[in-house]
Amino acid sequence: MTKTLRTPEHVYLCQRLRQARLDAGLTQADLAERLDKPQSFVAKVETRERRLDVIEFAKWMAACEGLDVVSEIVATIAEGRAQA
């Protein structure tokens, strides 16, 4: 399996992660605090410098109260419909 960093799917995921944070009314620092991570962790994910594993993805979405869109995000990526 090839690396996914900066692929269209990865770009799409990072856009959705950022949108989930913004929809929740959170700053990067707010989200980082909820995740018990430094603010730079959130920034690096959102700027596509760092990938998330599935556990981190679930925690991110839960912290943003965005669990309702997880299946949509996963389906879009799995079905090859992700566009940057």
Image: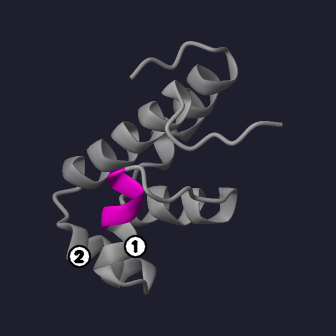
Write the residue at 22% across / 77% down: 29
- Across and down, in percent, residue 46 comes to 34, 53
Residue at the disc numbered 2: 30
The amino acid beneath tag 1 is Phe
- Identify residue for label 1: 41
Residue type at mark 2?
Asp
Q: Taking 12 as reference, is 42 above or below it? A: below
Which segment is the magenta one?
Answer: 43-47
Residue 76 lies in quadrant: top right
Check the image and report above or below for 17 versus 9: below
Q: Position of residue 25 (x, y in %)?
A: 16, 58
Q: Tell how many labels.
A: 2
Location of residue 16 in the rendering, given as x and y in whole percent from the top left corner? 38, 39
Q: Nearer the viewer, residue 10 or 71?
A: 10
Magenta stretch, main secondary structure, is helix
Residue at figure coordinates x 33%, y 52% from the top left: 47
